[in-house]
Amino acid sequence: MPLENTRKFKVSPCVCAILAALIAGSLSIGTVEFAGAQTAPTAAGPTAQSFQGSVPEGTASGQVMDLTLDDAIQRGLRTNLGVILSGTQTVSAKGQRLSQLQNLLPAVDASFKENYEQVDLAAEGIRFPGFPTVIGPYGFVDLRASLTWSLVDVKSLRNYIASKHSFAAAQLSADDAKQMVILTVGNAYLLVVADETEVASVQAQVTTSKVSLDQAVANHEAGTAPKIDELRARVDYQTLEQQLISAQNSLEKDRLALARTIGLPLEQKFNVADRAPYAAFDEIDLDAALKQAHVDRKDLAAMVEQTKAAELQRKAATAERFPTLTVNADYGDIGVNFGSSHGTVDATGNFSVPVFKEFGIRGDQQQAQSTLDTAKAQLSDKNAQVDADVRDALLDIQSAQKQVEVAKSNVDLATEALSEAQQRYKAGVSDNLPVSQAEQSVAQANDQYVSSLYRHNVAKLSLARSLGAAGQYKNYLDGKQGGK
């Protein structure tokens, strides 16, 4: 059987599904546009790809740094592009809330005017005997403050309350983005750890294969083994060398991906200081886990707030039919100069009732209703998605846990079989075909062990994210739920 390059943990379907579902789910929050309001373009929000990038921090040093998982996650929380874009969206939502608040508060403006005029009446066509041809100079000064206040405006009030919910949703989405960074960085870090384990495993296999090759060459030269044994051993050795080159290349590329995720300069050399040993996960109560997820998931809470904002927007569209009461007033000091000036005041009240805006109002209502229906559908789907995320993560943990245990047993058995085959060949009892086959079995068993261990640890991180407890990732990697 041919020796395969089995870096399956790189494209594991279950891992890809976990990350894709969680990232896509966390980015489903949108922004509610306020009916009738002129708003600036909103800041660009994070996408799934955003969490793979960062804003580089610092400069590369000539020394190799030891990077722990905690260090990597803390750097990611500062520099990851997904977190940064979530922060800008929060600032944008806060600005929108302040803009809506201003519509409810009085607007006061102050002005100062100094007027100076001189008129040539003759140039204007006014020419009478004995009448002056030039009037002036003359002028006045005017210092004034004006106030505009919408005392009754139900639409603006509901828009403001909706903007408060949108701001709360943006804050919750920013918190959820941090959870996504922990998952993304943790996955990238564990992948590098798995790569290093893979490289070490293949390197050990190359060393073992070289011993078998040297033995086959010596036996052939001594005339105790045919040429086919040497050729077979050489093919196995060179195949493993190719696999080692591929594994080392993947390791370097995944190091770059990790550096990109946490804002580390790409020139900076580093070693991952933490390992990811196998730790069986404690039994978990499914019902309690689902309840915890529905309480702690920030993306779900954000969608609840967004739905509330959409409901208020629908009510604000209805409130366009309501009358509004606006007060305009100004008070100032006017005169030829301030020494001879006098105060003046002007105040008006405006009671406005829409008479014929039915098509515009109905259009706004239909748009707001469509946004509300969309938000409700997304919220319902999100509730189901939260349940599915928890169940999927638990299934992946159970499956990977069993695979780790079986793979570890296979490694031990394959290693023992290789040792026996080598001893039989050395004693001249058999040719080296069993040795070649045993080496391939060891390679596959080691790869399956590394792959299953990586999937197991990523599944535990995914469970922490699914429960809204990614900040407690250490406990989950140690096989414990939460703070237990």
Image (spheres, rainbow, N blue to C red):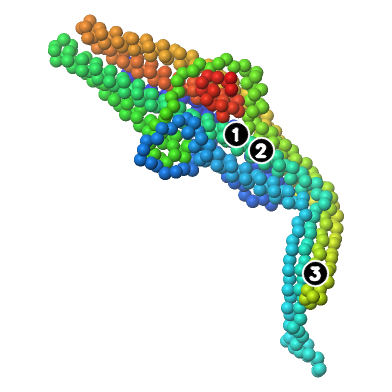
Q: Could you say where residue 360 lies in the image, as x and y percent from the top left?
A: 76, 49
State which mark lies toward you, 3 or 2: 3
> What residue did someone put label 3 on?
333
Residue 51 appears in the figure: no
Q: Pointers 1 and 3 in contact (CB under 8 A)?
A: no
Q: Which residue is mark 1?
A: 176
Instruction: Find residue 109 and report its image quarter.
Output: bottom right
What's the residue at 68%, 37% (across, down)? 306
- As measured in the structure, the alpha-carbon distance from the residue carrying label 1 to the one carrying label 3 is 56 Å
Q: Is residue 299 above or below residue 141?
A: above
What kind of residue is marked 3? Asp
- The one nearer the camera, 145 or 348, is 145
* Disc 2 element: helix
Q: Which-is-in-front pick, marks 1 and 3?
A: 3
Q: What residue do we see at 35% from left, 18% from top?
A: 443
Q: Could you tell which of marks 3 and 2 lies nearer the N-terminus?
A: 2
Spatial distance from mark 2 to mark 1, Cα to Cα? Answer: 10 Å
Residue 284: x and y, percent? 59, 17
